[in-house]
Every structure is written in C-alpha cells, then in structure tokens.
Amino acid sequence: MKRLLTRYLWAGAMLGVGGTLLSAPAAAQVHLIAQGRLASGGGDKAANTAAPLENGVAGNRLGGLGSALAYAGCDTFLALPDRGPNAKAWNAALDNTDSYITRFQTLRLTLHATPHDAHWPFRLQPALRQTTLLWSSSALVYGPGAAPVLNRAGHDYFTGRSDGFSADHASDWPADARLDPESLRISNDGRTLYIGDEYGPHLYRFDRQTGRRLGVIKLPAWLAVAHPAPTGHAETHHNRQGRVGNHGLEGLAISPDGTVLFGAMQGALIQDGGNHGAYARLLRIDLRSGRVQSFAYPLTRTSGRHGHARYSGISEIVAVNDHQLLVDERDGGGLGGKHPARVKRIYEVDLAGATPLGQAHGQAALGRHALGKHLFVDLVKRLGAHGVTPAQVPEKIEGMAFGPDVRWQGKAWHTLYVSTDNDFLDRVDGKPNPDRFFVLAFAPSDLPGYRAQQRAAACRRGS
C-alpha cells in the first residue's frame, strides 16, 4: 500500500515546498475499525464543583471531552474539555463563558474484537475513571466576582471565564486565571502534562497526579495580543498583531523521545491575514534549549475569493517522528454546524528541510515558505463508507492520538484514535450528540516514518 502524496495549497494547486510541482500517487489504505460513545448530561468525578454555574448548568457537567486526546499507555487516555459549557447564552459580553473550573478527564478506552461484524471489526468501550482539576499555587487574576469558591490560600483554580485577565499586560500574562485548554500531551515518564491554551496563547506544564501548574513554556510574544478583551471579536478587531480571538494554540504534539513539542495555531495570525488568512503557524519547541521555530502551514480554502476567502482550521496535530506530523483540519460543517461537513481531513506534513519563518510576517512572506502537505485520510469519506452522511458527521473532530497496535486480518496494525467535542450538549437539532471516539487502523507501510512515543513503563495485564 502506498501513501497518498497529493499536495494541497490554499489556491488548490498541487505545489510542494518552494512551489515545486508534484505528482499524486495512490491513496493510503486507512481503515475505520471501531467507534465508541460517551453520553453527556451527567456529572464527572469532581462532585465538589457541581454547584450551578452563572448560566445554570452544573459545574461538573460531563461533556466536551474531545477537545484533545492523549495516550497514556495500555488502554488509558486523557481527554481534555475546553473552557466549559458556554453554549447556553447568558452574557454575550463574556462570550457566554462561565466560571467552569478547567480540568482533564482520565478515560479507559477498551477495544473488543467483534469477529462476526464485517462492518465494525472492533467495538470501543469508553469509561470515565477520574477527573483532575487544574490549579496554580501562585495567585491568579479573575474577573469581578468570578473567583471559584473552592479557592484557598496557595490554591487558585483556572476557569474558562473570559474576563479573567489583567488589562495591564498582554494576553500571554501567566497570572491570568482564564484558561481555554485545547491541546494536551504527556511526558515520556507519564508524570507531566503539557497543555496548550487559546486565550494566551499559553503553553503550561501541569502535574498529572495533582493538576498543579508546574511551569510556563515561553512562546514568541507576537503570538499574543497586546490588548486582551472578554470577547474574541474585540480582541481581533482592537489589535494589529497576535492570534485571532479563540484561535490560539489548538494543537500540540510531542516527539517520540519527548524532547520536542510541536504546536499548531488554529488559524492565521492577525498580521498574517486574520480570519481571511491562508496560512497557520506550526511551532517547533525544543524543551532543552527553549528555542522556538515557526513554519507556514497552508490551510484548505472552503469558500470565498482571494482576499475575502475562508479557510478550514487546525484542530490537532500528532508527531509521527521528530520531523513529520499529522494535522487534523476541519471546517464548521456537520452535526451542530451550519452546513454538511466537507473538510474533516488528516494531512501529513514534514518539517525536515523546511524553511523556518524567523521574523517573517504577512501572507506573501508565509506563502513563499509554505510547507507541502499530503492527504492521509478524508474522514468525511471514511465515515460515509460506514453510513454516516456529511450532515451527521460530528462538527468538531478535535482530538487525535496514536494508540496501541492491534492484530487484525492476521496482521499487526497501528492505530490512530480521534475524538469529538460535543460542546457539552447531549442533543443537537433533536438528535443525540454524545462525545464520540473513532479508531483508525493503518499498516506500517502507510506511514513508514512512524515511531511510537517512548514510555517509562510497559503495560501489565489488567492495568
């Protein structure tokens, strides 16, 4: 089986790095082998946060699990809700955000073979095992009256409420209490979590066992906005540089040896075209030296004309090795969106030999150094083959993680798990809307550069 090496750039031309014309070999044989669902509506394990939020929703409502997904070994995964259940309107001046305490969920995702089911050869059984709240031992800045009642001396919780920032600092000020966690990876020893935030953007280290923030990984200042605001619209329109509102550090990957993180901005920076920008930034962060490089990733155009076009966004990335990434791109269509799903695709991109952007800004400059990308799998088509129409495809396919290898059809296969963010809504358009998990299987020849993350401990039977 060969990899699909079709290259896409924003204009739709088949161009690679530096504008080299490329050919299009045959497609990879990526199989959809399992699905699982975890219904929203109940509470998670943090019962002490169950008091109603400002919008009346329970503070421990289970949902939104698929914003990020990280593999912890065996059948254990960590899932990351974002800033909370803000789909219910209560205060537009705060983007309807509330004082939800941000957290991560520990899940068991167990695969069971179903040898008599030709359609789904495996069944995925999700189960919630633990909820861990995120907090800081140093004081945080909250909006008026928004400090969580659970706070105590030396123990301030991060929340999703958008006014939890200091107006005297840029949006990357680490004392801000607001946190919109959208990306998550685990260190090789399993003890430390790296969490990417949209508000700053921030990149924080947390203790996996306690949820305490351990440190801040410094990102380039030009990713932040100088004048933070409680709404994404105001932040975008009152700044000339930095991330577009709610388009921060959406994706995060870790190299197999654990020494490098890769970050992905959801869309173009304000100085790179903003809402009409064709290129998002991929970051390479060396954890030993602190050096950060950025690269131009070409987004898929979904509508409009040049200068007023709209593009898909990046929702997640995973590291194939120390220079190749898989990138999850999606539009706003599907179940819960305004139109049927069109772009839910996973692309492969290679940073080896690519030109870092340095101080280059603006669409023209980014276009000169844009990466090539290879389609790995089209999820709309793959789900369609299983009877899921474009209107039924979940809008927010946002989490992605390599999982354990499986034995199927007499061969060993690698797996890629993807997850959805249901915005804490148990029903959409009258239809059930659980958090969903899908398992993709691919042969080693379909991604020959793949190297699994090095982990400190092997799985034990029954663990």
Image (cartoon, grey):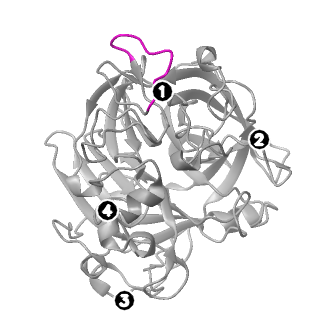
Secondary element at tag 1: loop
Name the residue that disc number 3 marks. 21
Name the residue that disc number 1 marks. 145
Determine the CA span between mark 2 and mark 1.
Answer: 29 Å
Q: Residue furthest left?
A: 289
Task: Name the amino acid, label 3.
Answer: Leu
Which region shows up in magenta?
Answer: 144-155
Q: In this rendered view, identify the residue nearer to me: 280 or 75.
A: 280
> Which numbered disc, 2 or 1, marks the residue closer to the eye?
1
Residue at (57%, 18%) from the top-left corner? Answer: 463
Q: Main secondary structure of the magenta part?
A: loop
- Labels 2 and 1: the sequence-earlier one: 1
Q: Position of residue 130 (x, y in %)?
A: 58, 20
Residue at (82%, 62%) from the top-left corner? Answer: 387
Task: Name the amino acid, label 4.
Answer: Asn
Q: Residue furthest front?
A: 144
The N terminus appears in which quarter of the rendering?
A: bottom right
The image quarter in which residue 54 lies: top right
Vertical arrangement, residue 41 with respect to residue 451, above or below: above
- Labels 3 and 4: the sequence-earlier one: 3
Q: Residue furthest top?
A: 153
Name the residue that disc number 2 marks. 426
Residue at (72%, 41%) from the top-left corner? Answer: 36
Task: Name the amino acid, label 2.
Answer: Asp
Name the residue that disc number 4 marks. 239
- Labels 2 and 4: the sequence-earlier one: 4
Task: Name the amino acid, label 1.
Answer: Gly
Q: Position of residue 174 (x, y in %)?
A: 28, 36
> Which numbered disc, 3 or 4, marks the residue closer to the eye?
4
Q: Is residue 256 visible?
A: no
Within 10 Å of disc 4 (Cα), the crowding (few <14, some 14-19, many 20+) is: some
Within 10 Å of disc 3 (Cα), the crowding (few <14, some 14-19, many 20+) is: few
